[in-house]
């Protein structure tokens, strides 16, 4: 009986040590996540493009976005895009600038949103203005 208890104790200790080591080295985390990030696509003008002036911008946000958490900024200033729902369930965001951006240089458009299951997403996009 004493040997069986020792054997059981040794097996339990070796299993717990192995699982601790796997977590320490990034393994054993389950491999999956219950959180799916918001995706951004179909930007217009496209990222890293060169335009003579920038008077409007649009982008599609995946349907798993919590639109109440959406923040869109242009060169650090928050803008309020017009949001419309596409047939796919995704959302089209469009913003038209009161004054077109004509100053040479890069324009930074940043988008931040949470998914409906709580995953934070961030997407920076750069457009170069070159008159």
Image: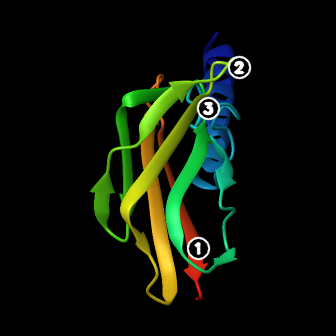
- Mark 2 falls on what kind of element? loop
From the viewer's side, name the closer residue of 55 and 114: 55
Q: Quadrant of residue 45?
A: bottom right
Residue at left offset 31%, top offset 68%: 76
Label 1 sits on residue = 127
In this rendering, position of residue 37 left or right of residue 73: right
Residue denoted by label 3: 62
Q: Residues within 10 Å of mark 2 (few under 14, many from 20)?
A: few
**Residue 69 falls left or right of residue 120:** left
Discs 3/1, front: 1
Choose top left, top right, bottom left or bottom right for residue 73: bottom left
| 116 to 50, vertically: above or below | above
Report which quarter residue 31 is drawn in: top right
Residue 93 point in image, percent of width and height: 51, 40
Secondary structure state at the residue bearing disc 3: loop
Q: Is residue 3 above or below residue 43?
A: above
Q: Quadrant of the N terminus?
A: top right
Q: Residue at x 69, y 24 (%)?
A: 7
Q: Is residue 57 left or right of residue 15?
A: left
**Where is residue 34 drawn, in percent x and y?**
58, 24
């Amino acid at each position: 009986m004493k040997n069986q208890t020792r054997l059981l104790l040794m097996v339990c200790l070796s299993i717990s040590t192995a699982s601790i080591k796997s977590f320490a080295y990034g393994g054993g985390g389950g491999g999956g996540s219950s959180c799916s990030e918001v995706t951004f696509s179909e930007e217009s003008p496209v990222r890293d493009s060169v335009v003579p002036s920038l008077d409007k911008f649009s982008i599609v946000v995946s349907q798993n976005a919590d639109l109440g958490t959406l923040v869109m900024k242009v060169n650090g200033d928050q803008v309020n895009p017009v949001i419309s729902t596409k047939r796919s369930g995704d959302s089209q965001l469009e913003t038209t600038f009161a004054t077109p951006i004509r100053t040479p240089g890069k324009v930074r458009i940043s988008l931040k949103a949470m998914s409906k299951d709580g995953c934070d997403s961030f997407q920076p996009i750069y457009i170069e203005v070159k008159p």
